[in-house]
Image (tube, rainbow, N blue to C red):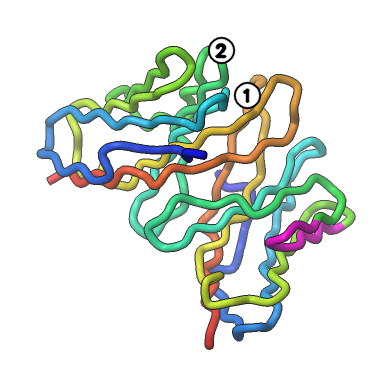
Amino acid sequence: GAGVSQSPSNKVTEKGKDVELRCDPISGHTALYWYRQSLGQGLEFLIYFQGNSAPDKSGLPSDRFSAERTGGSVSTLTIQRTQQEDSAVYLCASSPLAGGVFTDTQYFGPGTRLTVL
Amino acid sequence: DAKTTQPPSMDCAEGRAANLPCNHSTISGNEYVYWYRQIHSQGPQYIIHGLKNNETNEMASLIITEDRKSSTLILPHATLRDTAVYYCIVRVITSGTYKYIFGTGTRLKVLA
Protein backbone atom coordinates (compact mmCIF):
# COMPACT_ATOMS: atom_id res chain seq x y z
CA GLY A 1 0.00 0.00 0.00
CA ALA A 2 0.93 3.66 -0.15
CA GLY A 3 3.39 4.92 2.40
CA VAL A 4 3.71 8.33 3.99
CA SER A 5 4.01 11.05 1.37
CA GLN A 6 5.29 14.58 1.78
CA SER A 7 5.19 17.59 -0.46
CA PRO A 8 7.00 19.41 -1.79
CA SER A 9 10.13 17.28 -1.88
CA ASN A 10 12.26 20.41 -2.10
CA LYS A 11 11.46 23.98 -1.20
CA VAL A 12 13.68 27.00 -1.66
CA THR A 13 12.46 30.23 -0.15
CA GLU A 14 13.73 33.64 0.79
CA LYS A 15 14.31 34.72 4.35
CA GLY A 16 11.18 36.22 5.85
CA LYS A 17 8.71 34.31 3.68
CA ASP A 18 6.18 31.81 5.04
CA VAL A 19 6.23 28.16 3.95
CA GLU A 20 3.79 25.28 4.26
CA LEU A 21 4.88 21.67 4.26
CA ARG A 22 2.38 18.89 3.77
CA CYS A 23 2.24 15.34 5.07
CA ASP A 24 -0.15 12.61 3.98
CA PRO A 25 0.05 9.78 6.51
CA ILE A 26 -0.74 6.16 5.87
CA SER A 27 -4.49 5.70 5.80
CA GLY A 28 -5.86 4.69 9.17
CA HIS A 29 -2.82 5.70 11.17
CA THR A 30 -3.91 7.68 14.19
CA ALA A 31 -0.58 9.14 15.25
CA LEU A 32 1.44 11.65 13.23
CA TYR A 33 4.84 13.13 14.02
CA TRP A 34 6.94 15.93 12.60
CA TYR A 35 10.71 15.97 12.95
CA ARG A 36 13.47 18.24 11.72
CA GLN A 37 16.88 17.02 10.64
CA SER A 38 19.64 19.52 10.10
CA LEU A 39 22.60 18.58 7.94
CA GLY A 40 24.57 15.74 9.50
CA GLN A 41 22.44 15.73 12.64
CA GLY A 42 19.97 13.36 14.20
CA LEU A 43 16.24 13.90 14.20
CA GLU A 44 14.73 16.64 16.36
CA PHE A 45 11.16 16.04 17.50
CA LEU A 46 8.82 18.92 16.70
CA ILE A 47 5.19 17.96 17.25
CA TYR A 48 2.97 14.93 17.71
CA PHE A 49 -0.71 14.39 16.91
CA GLN A 50 -2.67 11.47 18.32
CA GLY A 51 -6.25 11.07 17.17
CA ASN A 52 -8.43 13.95 18.33
CA SER A 53 -6.29 14.77 21.34
CA ALA A 54 -4.53 18.11 21.69
CA PRO A 55 -1.16 17.89 19.98
CA ASP A 56 2.10 17.73 21.89
CA LYS A 57 3.81 20.90 20.67
CA SER A 58 6.69 20.74 23.12
CA GLY A 59 9.31 20.35 20.41
CA LEU A 60 8.41 23.38 18.32
CA PRO A 61 11.49 25.64 18.40
CA SER A 62 9.64 28.97 18.29
CA ASP A 63 6.20 30.51 17.83
CA ARG A 64 6.98 30.89 14.13
CA PHE A 65 6.31 27.17 13.83
CA SER A 66 2.80 25.75 13.88
CA ALA A 67 1.09 22.62 12.67
CA GLU A 68 -2.39 21.37 12.19
CA ARG A 69 -3.98 18.12 11.26
CA THR A 70 -7.32 18.30 9.52
CA GLY A 71 -9.84 15.51 9.86
CA GLY A 72 -7.34 13.31 11.60
CA SER A 73 -5.46 12.75 8.37
CA VAL A 74 -3.40 15.28 6.39
CA SER A 75 -1.08 17.54 8.34
CA THR A 76 0.48 20.87 7.46
CA LEU A 77 3.57 22.31 9.12
CA THR A 78 3.78 26.08 8.71
CA ILE A 79 6.88 28.15 9.27
CA GLN A 80 6.33 31.89 9.33
CA ARG A 81 8.98 34.49 8.60
CA THR A 82 11.55 31.83 7.75
CA GLN A 83 15.13 32.23 8.90
CA GLN A 84 18.27 30.66 7.48
CA GLU A 85 18.59 28.42 10.53
CA ASP A 86 15.26 26.86 9.55
CA SER A 87 17.01 25.17 6.62
CA ALA A 88 16.74 21.43 7.18
CA VAL A 89 14.93 18.31 6.08
CA TYR A 90 11.49 18.12 7.64
CA LEU A 91 10.32 14.55 8.14
CA CYS A 92 6.84 13.32 8.85
CA ALA A 93 5.98 9.91 10.29
CA SER A 94 2.75 8.14 11.06
CA SER A 95 1.97 5.29 13.36
CA PRO A 96 -0.93 2.94 13.92
CA LEU A 97 -0.68 3.62 17.63
CA ALA A 98 -3.95 3.00 19.38
CA GLY A 99 -4.89 4.02 22.90
CA GLY A 100 -3.55 1.68 25.51
CA VAL A 101 -1.00 0.12 23.18
CA PHE A 102 2.53 0.55 24.42
CA THR A 103 4.39 -0.39 21.28
CA ASP A 104 4.21 1.17 17.86
CA THR A 105 6.26 1.59 14.74
CA GLN A 106 6.71 4.88 12.95
CA TYR A 107 6.64 4.93 9.18
CA PHE A 108 8.56 7.86 7.78
CA GLY A 109 8.01 9.85 4.64
CA PRO A 110 10.87 10.89 2.36
CA GLY A 111 11.01 14.38 3.85
CA THR A 112 10.91 17.93 2.52
CA ARG A 113 14.25 19.63 2.07
CA LEU A 114 13.81 23.30 2.98
CA THR A 115 16.44 25.82 2.00
CA VAL A 116 16.11 29.38 3.23
CA LEU A 117 18.27 31.83 1.32
CA ASP B 1 18.42 15.75 25.97
CA ALA B 2 19.18 12.52 24.14
CA LYS B 3 18.74 9.53 26.38
CA THR B 4 21.03 7.34 24.31
CA THR B 5 24.71 7.40 23.45
CA GLN B 6 26.22 5.60 20.49
CA PRO B 7 29.64 5.52 18.85
CA PRO B 8 29.69 7.95 15.94
CA SER B 9 30.92 5.46 13.38
CA MET B 10 31.78 1.80 12.80
CA ASP B 11 33.08 -0.32 9.94
CA CYS B 12 32.10 -3.90 9.25
CA ALA B 13 33.25 -6.37 6.62
CA GLU B 14 30.60 -7.62 4.21
CA GLY B 15 29.17 -10.95 5.34
CA ARG B 16 30.26 -10.50 8.95
CA ALA B 17 28.03 -9.65 11.87
CA ALA B 18 27.68 -5.98 12.70
CA ASN B 19 27.26 -5.30 16.42
CA LEU B 20 26.09 -1.79 17.18
CA PRO B 21 26.13 -0.79 20.86
CA CYS B 22 23.92 1.73 22.61
CA ASN B 23 23.96 3.06 26.16
CA HIS B 24 20.72 4.21 27.76
CA SER B 25 21.65 4.32 31.42
CA THR B 26 18.77 6.61 32.44
CA ILE B 27 16.05 4.53 30.85
CA SER B 28 12.90 4.11 32.93
CA GLY B 29 11.02 0.89 33.52
CA ASN B 30 8.30 1.44 30.93
CA GLU B 31 10.45 2.98 28.21
CA TYR B 32 11.06 0.94 25.11
CA VAL B 33 14.25 0.87 23.07
CA TYR B 34 13.78 1.28 19.32
CA TRP B 35 16.26 1.01 16.50
CA TYR B 36 15.86 2.76 13.19
CA ARG B 37 18.24 3.26 10.32
CA GLN B 38 18.52 5.97 7.75
CA ILE B 39 20.03 5.36 4.38
CA HIS B 40 21.33 8.46 2.68
CA SER B 41 18.60 10.90 1.61
CA GLN B 42 15.78 8.65 2.78
CA GLY B 43 13.45 8.75 5.77
CA PRO B 44 14.34 6.52 8.73
CA GLN B 45 13.30 2.89 8.56
CA TYR B 46 12.14 0.84 11.52
CA ILE B 47 14.33 -2.13 12.42
CA ILE B 48 13.33 -3.57 15.77
CA HIS B 49 12.27 -2.65 19.29
CA GLY B 50 12.23 -4.21 22.75
CA LEU B 51 11.54 -3.61 26.41
CA LYS B 52 13.60 -6.09 28.38
CA ASN B 53 13.66 -9.38 26.48
CA ASN B 54 15.94 -10.06 23.56
CA GLU B 55 14.15 -9.76 20.23
CA THR B 56 14.78 -11.09 16.76
CA ASN B 57 13.12 -10.42 13.44
CA GLU B 58 14.00 -10.86 9.78
CA MET B 59 16.27 -7.82 9.83
CA ALA B 60 18.18 -7.99 13.09
CA SER B 61 18.48 -9.11 16.68
CA LEU B 62 18.29 -6.87 19.72
CA ILE B 63 20.12 -7.82 22.88
CA ILE B 64 19.16 -5.83 25.99
CA THR B 65 21.20 -6.18 29.16
CA GLU B 66 19.46 -7.37 32.28
CA ASP B 67 19.72 -3.95 33.93
CA ARG B 68 18.42 -2.39 30.67
CA LYS B 69 21.15 0.23 30.71
CA SER B 70 22.50 -0.80 27.33
CA SER B 71 21.62 -2.77 24.25
CA THR B 72 23.22 -4.10 21.09
CA LEU B 73 21.76 -4.30 17.63
CA ILE B 74 23.09 -7.23 15.65
CA LEU B 75 22.95 -7.47 11.88
CA PRO B 76 23.96 -11.13 11.44
CA HIS B 77 25.34 -10.95 7.91
CA ALA B 78 25.98 -7.36 6.90
CA THR B 79 25.66 -6.43 3.23
CA LEU B 80 26.72 -3.29 1.40
CA ARG B 81 23.08 -2.16 1.46
CA ASP B 82 23.22 -2.07 5.26
CA THR B 83 25.48 0.98 5.08
CA ALA B 84 23.46 3.63 6.90
CA VAL B 85 23.15 5.68 10.07
CA TYR B 86 21.66 3.57 12.85
CA TYR B 87 19.69 5.30 15.56
CA CYS B 88 19.05 3.86 19.00
CA ILE B 89 16.01 5.60 20.44
CA VAL B 90 14.21 5.59 23.73
CA ARG B 91 10.49 6.15 23.58
CA VAL B 92 9.42 8.19 26.57
CA ILE B 93 5.96 8.93 27.84
CA THR B 94 5.37 12.43 29.12
CA SER B 95 1.96 13.76 30.11
CA GLY B 96 0.34 10.80 28.45
CA THR B 97 1.93 11.29 25.07
CA TYR B 98 4.79 9.49 23.39
CA LYS B 99 8.00 11.12 22.32
CA TYR B 100 10.98 9.60 20.58
CA ILE B 101 14.34 10.97 21.60
CA PHE B 102 16.81 10.50 18.75
CA GLY B 103 20.54 10.73 19.33
CA THR B 104 23.11 11.34 16.62
CA GLY B 105 23.36 7.69 15.69
CA THR B 106 26.15 5.40 14.49
CA ARG B 107 27.27 5.66 10.90
CA LEU B 108 27.87 2.06 9.83
CA LYS B 109 29.97 1.47 6.75
CA VAL B 110 29.94 -2.05 5.36
CA LEU B 111 33.13 -2.75 3.45
CA ALA B 112 33.43 -5.07 0.47
> From the viewer's perspective, is residue A99 above or below residue B4?
above
Q: Is residue A85 visible?
A: no
Residue A105 appears left or right of A88: right
Q: Is residue A21 visible?
A: yes
Within the magenta stretch, is there residue B64?
A: yes
Residue in front for this viewpoint, B41 or B1 = B41
Residue B71 appears left or right of A91: right
The chain to which mark 2 is attached is: A
Q: Amino acid at mark 2?
A: Ser
- Marks 2 and 1, how far apart in space? 10 Å
Secondary structure at numbered mark 2: loop
Secondary structure at numbered mark 1: strand
Label 1 sits on residue: B97
The chain to which mark 1 is attached is: B
Label 2 sits on residue: A53
Q: Does the residue at mark 2 contact the one at mark 1 (Cβ under 8 Å)?
A: yes
Q: Position of residue A45 (x, y in %)?
A: 48, 37
Residue neighbourhood size for the residue with mark 1, other residues' Cα within 10 Å, grouped as few (<14), some (14–19), many (≥20):
some
Name the residue at 50% across, 18% down. A55
Boundaries of the magenta span: B56-65
Q: Considering the image in quadrants, where does the N terminus of chain B appear?
A: top right
